[in-house]
Structure formats: structure tokens, C-alpha cells
Amino acid sequence: MNESTHFRDRDEVVGSIRDFLLAAESLPSPRGAALQLLELSRDPETSIDAVVRVIRSDPALSGFVVRAASAARFGRTERALDLQHAVIRLGMNIVRAHALALSLASYRPNTGCRRFDYFAFWTSALLNASVMEALAGHRGDLPKTEAFTLGLLSDIGKLAFATARPDDYDRVLARGATPHEDLDRAEQEVFGFDHRELSAVLLAEWGIPTALADVVYWQCDPEGGGFAPDSRAYRLACGLQFASRLAQTCLAAQPDPDSVAAVYLRGAVLDLSPDESRALATEALGELPVWTGLVGLPKATITTLPADWAS
Amino acid sequence: MRRPNVFFRISPVLDRNSAQFRANAAVDAREAIEAEHAVTIENPSRPGNARRRQDGLHRARRAGGPLPDAEKRANAIIRQLLSTKTRDPAERARWGAESAEVIDFLMRLQKGETSAALGGQTFSLPQAVPDATNLVTVLLDAGLGKHLGEAGALILEVVATLFDRIFDDSRVPAPIKGLIGRLQIPVLQLAMVDHDFFSDRAHPARRLINALAHAGTTWDGDVTADSPLYRAGDTTVRRIAGEFAADPEVFARCQREFDAFLAEQDRHADERAATLTERLKQREQHGLARDVARKAIVAPLAKDGIPDVVRTFAETTWLTVLTHALIEAGEEGAAWREAVATLEGVVWSVLPKYDAASRTEMVQRLPAWLRAVKAGMTRVALDEAAQKQFFAELVRLHAAALKAGMTPPEGLPRPPPKAGRRAGVAADEPTPQSLELDLLSRGSWIELRDESGGIRRLRLSWISPARTMYLFANRQGQRALALTRNELTRRFATGEAATASEEALLDRVVDAVLDEFQR
């Protein structure tokens, strides 16, 4: 999030996003089980059994939820959870978010945005989520399930841009790919807001708690969000930046020095030594094939996080 | 009016025919002659001989003062001796050229005869005496003056005194005095026939004696019969004793050869010293560059709130990096500009970041700064562990800078500036010692006094381009000593070092003696 973001009125930005969403002919939309889960979540009387029935109707979602619930367990030494226990453990909000993500990941519209790589986008989102989960596990003071969900959906705005305005976003991505060009700035110039702002509004629209949407909104400049220095929201925002830059680094053919610096810098803010940051990266990268396999994504090519962040 | 110490010895010769002189001088001279006698019966070469003569003179002056006529005539002769070169035979005849008999007499002594007769008197030179025995004084005391003309008698006296002074000079090593002593009869003979010896500082004989004395005083260590200097001087003296026959050209030839020997020694010493100059140049360059680098870090470190880790890094590791960069390509070089910019960047990066633009800029620019820091550390061969430790500290400081930016600036505690951090480098004020150093040039000799009071004379062989390093070598070129300007200034200030007198021995002695005569 660059400087210009902070001098824009937030309500105005949110208003622009809403107009954008209303005018969009197509948006990433939950379908099937995800859509049913969203509807169920609006009914406070919904039983766990009803939710489990819907999830079970989608084998991919079932595996995803059980896996997520297992990963969220401390130590991972318990026997495998059944679906009902997995739903109870994750909670309705997280199950809904997972269903949403899986639904979106499974839907691959053939848009005119040639430069938007769906596989790469979801691989990055899953690695982001894995890093967030590993970070939460390492620190012990962040909720693992929330962390995973935030990582998974924090960049959903990109998918929204590519779906709603594929041609315009194709040009934005072309600009963003050139050296010294900032993707956020290009998005703001074309759409009036960037993909992180759009992500935050979309998450709020989909029923994700506003506090978490704020974290997504401020992930690029956690210090600018007005969070208390020791707050969970600040740590989550820092974690999101750490995770997204780590994913960016490890999924790139060549590590970007800025991203590497940001990884280690954010790691330091989160009290991670460089060695600990690398250990988290290794742990998350180990989980990535499991997640991509569940969603049906091709195996990703991984670049190791440089050990020397000044190199 | 002060009278020359030797005046009363020559005045009888000058005034052999002056009854007035005899009448006036009898009482005055008695005491002086008595004092003189006390000296001449001792070894005439004994140090302090000239001083004792002078004491006698002073007593004589107290007794009654000089004889005006005799003094006038003596002064006239001295003026003649001091006058510019004149080869006008009439002018020389006016003062009386010595007879062929006198020259032949001196020639026989020069050739090694132990005794020779002149005017019916036989003069014997003492045998088996030290080389630095004043033989001219022996002849003088034996009454040689009575057989010479007015000028000749005066010259005899002056030459005797010259050698007294030379032998009294404690700086000239005894073996060199011995060599010079072996030139007494040739010099006396030369002085009789070539009065330019007294007036012309560039006279070959004077230059030769000066060179011998100077080489002796600047010889590092004992001069022995095996010393190259002694061997060269011995050869020269033998040639003069064997070849000189009233022809000054022999002295000129020998002087040129001896000068060539000294020049070769200097060249050899310079050549050996030159093997050190490249290293010294590098040291100087390094020192100067470090000074500039030290000044360059003052401004970036003047900011408040800079963590000690970064200060220490700037004042140690980065100071070295800056120094190297400066040596590499100067202040206009990319390496220097980048090193300065990197330091400014690193300092800025650890200060609190209060706005998003600063935070964004920090993340964007950090990689380049860190790469430059790493490259600099590698260039100055900082070990890996130290590098790793600094980067670990730095990243912690960066995190702290981000977090610190979440609190409004007003609330931030500002550490007071550390004392002495901003102290500028005072410009060097010229001191008498530094001004004296500025006068030193290649070939200058200095004297270094050691703790035991011993003095070593060293020749300035090389001055660094920025005049901060001085390389000295001894005459033999066997020892070299490099001193920084600061150290040399200190030694000049404490008296441990001094510029060696450049005044040639004989010039000083001749001037002093003739000056006494004139007065």
C-alpha cells in the first residue's frame, strides 16, 4: 500500500469498490456447496449436521475441511478427525471461508485477462495460507484457523479484478510486470482502488468479520492501520505481509530482493530470527503439495528463500 | 676591542723591525706567550689547544691591549686573504710570495722526510704520534714563521689554528680527523701558494676537507680502517700526499673522486630506501583517506537516536570501507559516493518511520543498501560471523524503527547527543617545529637523539607526496627509518630530533679564525 492510499478517504474508496462490484458483469462467486454453506450461515438455527451434510456432498470440500482441521490441531499427533469433528473444531466461519476459497479455486472462467494465471494465483494463496498457519503455530498467540483463512483470501481482489474487468486488468498486469512499476499504484490509477482494498471489501461482503477484513486492508502497511503495537490485528497484518512476500519469493523464478528484504524485515517485527523465518518457509513449503493436490492444482516449482537477505 | 688569539704569536714576525712594537708588546705579550708556552709544550693536537690559546690572548689583552700598527698590517693581510680571487701577481707579490726554498722545504716534509732545513734551521716532525697531531703547530712553535714572509707567517698561524679547530671538533670521528690531519702539510703548502683557499668556499681543498668531515660526522656507527668511507678517504689522502706539488688541481681531482664516492653512497642509500617508499606511499594514502572518511561520517552520525550498533559500525567497519573506496577512485569515484550514500541510508533506516511513504521507501531501498553493506564488508574482509551478527542486529533495529513509527514522534524519547560526537577536526596550526619540517628537503640531514643521549645522523631520503611521511637512511644505506610528520614534529618539539647543521666544517672554522684575526 503506497503513500497515496493513506491520503484517500476510506469511505470513498469503499464506495468506489461497491460501485465496481455492482457494475461488474461477472465476479468470483461461490457455487454449489459453498453457496449453500453461505446461505446456511445466515441462519443462526443451522445445525452442525446440516453443515456436514452439505460439505459431504462435495468430496473436495470434505477433504479440504478435514485437512484444515487436522492441521489446526496442536502437535498433529491425534488420530484423523471425522468430518463432524473437523467442522466443530474449525468453526462455522472458517468452514465457510474454506468452502468459499475452494469453490472459487475450482471455478476457472475463461476470461480475456491473459496475464492472470489462475494456477499461480491459487498456488500462491495456498502457500500464503500455509505460511500463516505455520506462523500462528510458531508464535502460539495467533488463531491458526483465522490465520490460514486470511492467507487464503487476502489477495482475492486480484481474482475479482481479473473476473470483472479482464481487459483492464490485463493492461494493469502488463504495467505491473515492468520494472519499477508498482501494481498497487497501477490498480489505483485504473480502478480507483487496489486489489487489497477490494479483497477487504469482498471478505466483508462474504461475511468474514470486519476486524479480519481490516487486517487484509492494512497488510501492506501494518503500521499505518492504527493498530495497537501489541495487538493481534497488528501481528496478523504483519504476518500477512510476511506470508505474501514469502510466497512471492518462493514461487518466483528469481527471488525479488525487495520481497526477500520484506520477508526478513517482517519476520523481525514478528520476533523471528532469519533462521526461524527460513524454518517457517520450509515448513509451509512442505505443506503446499498437500493443499494444491486437494484443490487439483499442478505441482508448483519452488525457489528457496535466500539464506542471505542482502544477496 | 677583542684581539685574535694568535695575534701575539705572529706580531713579532710582522714587526720584526718595529721597535715600537717590541716596546709596547713586551709586557702585554709576556703573559700570553707564557700561556702559549704552557700549551705548546704539551701535545699540540690535544683538544682544547685553541681554547687555551684564546685564554692566553684574553689575558694579554687585559694586560695592555694590541699594537695598532701591527694589527693594521695583519688585518690588511687577512682582508687580502678574504678578498675575492685575485691572481694578480703584482697584488700577490705585494704581500710576499713564499720563496721556492720554502715550498721545497714543505714538499720534503710532505713526501715523508722526518726533518728538513730552512734558513739554516732544521725542523723535525715528531714520529709515531697520532694522525690528528697538529704538525703545523709543531713547525710554528719551532720557529718556522721567522723564515717566512709577512703573509706566509700569518698563513702558517691561521692554518695551525684551523687544524686546531678541526681536531677540537667532537663531532668528527677520530679516524677521519686522522685522515684530515695527514693533509696538514699539503694544505699548508697550498695555502702558501693559493690564497683563494681562504676566500673561496668552493675551493677544492676546502670542499674535500668539508666532505671528509661531513661524511665522518654522518657516518652511522664507528669509522674503522675497514669502513668504506675510511678506505675511500685514505686513498684520497695518499694520492694528495704523493702527487700534490703546489698544484691545486690535484686537490680538485681528488675532491671530485671523493664526491663521486659520496654521491654513489647516497645513491645506494636512496636506492635501498626506495624499496620502502611504495609501502610508505600506500600508508600515507591510507592515512589521508581515513581522515577524509572520518570527516565524511560526522554528518550522518550527527543525528539523534542512532543506535550504538550503527554508530560503532560506521566508525569501524564502514570507516574502513570508505577509506578503501577513496583510495580506489577518489571522492569523485562511484565507490566513494555509493559508500557515503549507503551509510546515510543505513543510518536513516534505523530511525523511526512515521509515515507509510517512509516505510515503503525503507522496504524498497533496504535491499540495495544491505547489498552495498555486504559488499563493503566483504571488500574489507570482515569475517562471516561478524557480518552475520551485524545483519541480525540491523534487522532487529529495522523492525524497531517500524514499530517506533506507530507512536507519534512527540512521544518518542530522544537520547541526548553523545558528547564529542560532533567535534570537528581542528585545522592544524603551524608550529615552529612544523615550519622547520617544511624546510627539510631530500638530502637534508637530521640528528636523532636516543634515550642514552647518543646521536644518530640520518639523511632524508624521501618525502611522501603529501609530506606526511619522512623516510631517512643512514649514510651506508643500511638502516632506514620512516617517521610520520606528527612523530617528527613531536621529536623536534622535544629535542629528540634536530636539523643537522649544513654549514661545512672548514667554512665555519675558516670564517671564525679569520674573523678573529680581523677583529
Image (cartoon, helix red, strand yellow):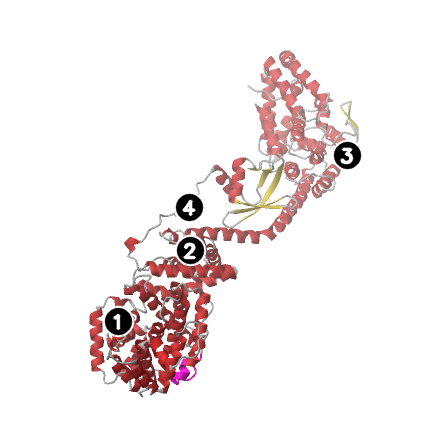
Q: Residues within 10 Å of mark 3 (few under 14, many from 20)?
A: some
At label 2, the amino acid type is: Val
Give the percent coordinates (x, y) of residue B55: 63, 19
Give the percent coordinates (x, y) of residue B286: 50, 53
Label 3 – label 1 distance at C-alpha: 124 Å
Residue A166 visible in the displayed image: no
The N terminus of chain B lies in quadrant: top right
Mark number, residue A210: 1
Left or right of residue B463, residue B138 in this image: right
Mark 4, secondary structure of its residue: loop
At label 1, the amino acid type is: Thr
Mark number, residue B310: 2
Of badges 1 and 4, nearer the viewer stands: 1
Camera-side residue: B196 or A258? A258
Label 1 – label 4 distance at C-alpha: 59 Å
Answer whether labels 2 and 1 touch (C-beta < 8 Å).
no
Q: Quadrant of residue B449?
A: top right
Mark 3, secondary structure of its residue: loop
Answer whether labels 3 and 1 touch (C-beta < 8 Å).
no
Of badges 2 and 1, nearer the viewer stands: 1
Label 2 – label 4 distance at C-alpha: 22 Å
Of badges 3 and 1, nearer the viewer stands: 1
Q: Residue at x 50, y 59 (%)?
A: B386
Which callout, 2 or 4, points at the residue further toward the start of the chain? 2
Mark number, residue B111: 3
Of badges 2 and 4, nearer the viewer stands: 2
Answer whether labels 1 and 4 touch (C-beta < 8 Å).
no
Magenta region: A291-301
At label 4, the amino acid type is: Val
Q: Which residue is mark 4?
A: B425
